[in-house]
Image: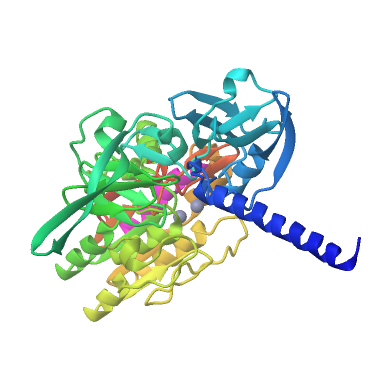
Amino acid sequence: MNKSNKILLALSIVLLLILIATYYLFLSKDHYVPDLFVRGDIEDVINLKETSSFNQVKIEHKGKKIKVYKLEDVVNRALPLSEEYELVLSGNDGRRAVIDGKQLNFSYLNYSSENGWEVINFNHPISSNIKLLKNITVVDKKSDFFDSLTIITQSENIIKTTVGELLTGSYTKKPFLRGSSTLNVDGQLYSVDVYSEKRVISLADLVDREILGRTVIYNKKGETLIHRDGFLELTNNKISYFNSESEEWLEDITGIVLDAPLTSNKDVFYDSLHYLEAGYKVLVVLLDGFGYHQYNYCLDEEIIPFMAEIENSSQAITSYKPVTNTGLAAVLTGKGPQENKIYSRDFKHIAVDDIFKKISKMSLNSVYIEGNIKILNTSIEPILNPDLNQNGITDDEIFKKTLKQMNGNANFVFVHFHGIDDMGHTYGPYGEKTIEMITQSDRYIQELAQNWPGKIIITADHGMHSILNGGDHGLVIYQDMFVPYLITDGGLKDE
Ligand SMILES: [Zn+2]
Ligand SMILES: [Zn+2]
């Protein structure tokens, strides 16, 4: 072969390659690949239309060698919220197969113009090979409450679900008007209304009853909406709440309280100021981690005689997230996290005036008695109480300090006991030591009351629920969200 022939051959090969490349490019551009969503209890929604970042593997299927995607790779990319999940594979024709997330090692996804997206499971019964696959829904099987939606009443946790579970259940598709526009063509008006479809479930349908009372909705950030009835909207990995009449909207919700009480521990702020303005002294006793259910139990057991005698008692709701910083901030500011900006344990700086500031503006004196650590940046410094006798709790030190401070010139004494929460975490909300701590707190309050010539408000920052070894709080469940709220008069009436 001479030189010019070689060049000609090389040129022909290059030309051929360009032609092939153009053909494939043209083919892939022109070819419509349908959506295949990985959705549900995951962090990132994936549309498999964009396959460029996934590796393909070669398998033999029905006598043919084909290139496919590993189902496991695709699902892992979506970051499932827990390691225990099911995959619900649903096809366009309504067929679906459910497989365990732990058994994906021989499952593949294939795209062909004949079958669309298709799942090929080598180790599962053939019926799991769904063609014209439309959605792969990850459904969390783990039984913990994080990343789930809970719906509760004042005494019951009625629903715990996830977006994955709701997406695989029944919902309605509703068109919602997104906007209208009009074009003027030669004096003629052409208008169009654009709708988008939402997957919705009415709250009343979900809980299977009429929604009559006050409904409080929380999102994961700690933002709150108060409503009666509304809809849940399911996006591919979030549940949001909206009310189409008021057009209020809360994204990524985590809990709903039905028939929520009007009393909240935020009332401490308003009630205290009210009494102080009326010339009373006020003592506030905050019993950390004392849930309403524990209070009820102790009433039944007749082991808190002092608190049992208080007639002005209500079940109060605390703020989300039911942890100390958030609950304490709500009590001290009369506002929820949306306004005071204390959303969780990670926050310390209060964005609004606290009660101590308000009281100093009234030219009255406040004292704030804490445990061994400062929790929030309050406008007055708390008096801290280390565990001097090293008996493992600070309540005895706090109690003595409070008695001493009450004899001073303070119009407002705020005392935060921690023993019930400490014992609750270690022994559970009904542990023997926890219950003993509650009865001990009752005795402390009784003695404080006998020495206090003014009003007394007793409440908690949050409740406590049982876990495998002890107790915890931080969820929208009735055990964590509700606390007692008691108002009484001090004085030496019992002697
Ligand atoms: Zn607490
Ligand atoms: Zn705690």
The one nearer the camera, 254 or 309, is 254
Residue closer to the observer: 131 or 159: 131
Q: Is residue 465 left or right of residue 315?
A: right
Please say if 245 is above or below 270: above
Nearest the viewer among 103 and 267 is: 103
- Who's the residue at 34% across and 67% down the image? 340
The quadrant holding residue 204 is top left
Looking at the image, residue 127 sits to the left or right of residue 250; the answer is: right
User: Please, what is the dominant secondary structure of the magenta stretch?
Assistant: helix
Q: Is residue 282 left or right of residue 23?
A: left
Is residue 438 within the magenta segment? yes
Magenta stretch holds residue 138: no
Q: Position of residue 178 (x, y in %)?
A: 24, 53
Q: How many marks?
A: 0
Q: Is residue 178 visible?
A: yes
**At x 35% / y 53%, what residue is drawn?**
251
Q: Nearer the viewer, residue 169 or 381?
A: 169
Q: Quadrant of residue 68?
A: top right
Q: Is residue 264 visible to us here?
A: no
Residue 365: % across, % down: 29, 77
Query: Is the N terminus in the top left, top right, bottom left or bottom right quadrant?
Result: bottom right
Please tell me which residue is depicted at 60% across the width and 42% down the height of the picture.
75
Q: State the extent of the magenta-drawn residues as a range.
A: 434-452
Q: How is the image coloured?
A: rainbow
> How far across and how far down the image is residue 347, in percent?
46, 67
Q: Residue furthest left?
A: 187
Rendered location of residue 14, percent (x, y)? 74, 60
Q: Is residue 106 left or right of residue 92?
A: right
- Outermost residue toward the right in this view: 1
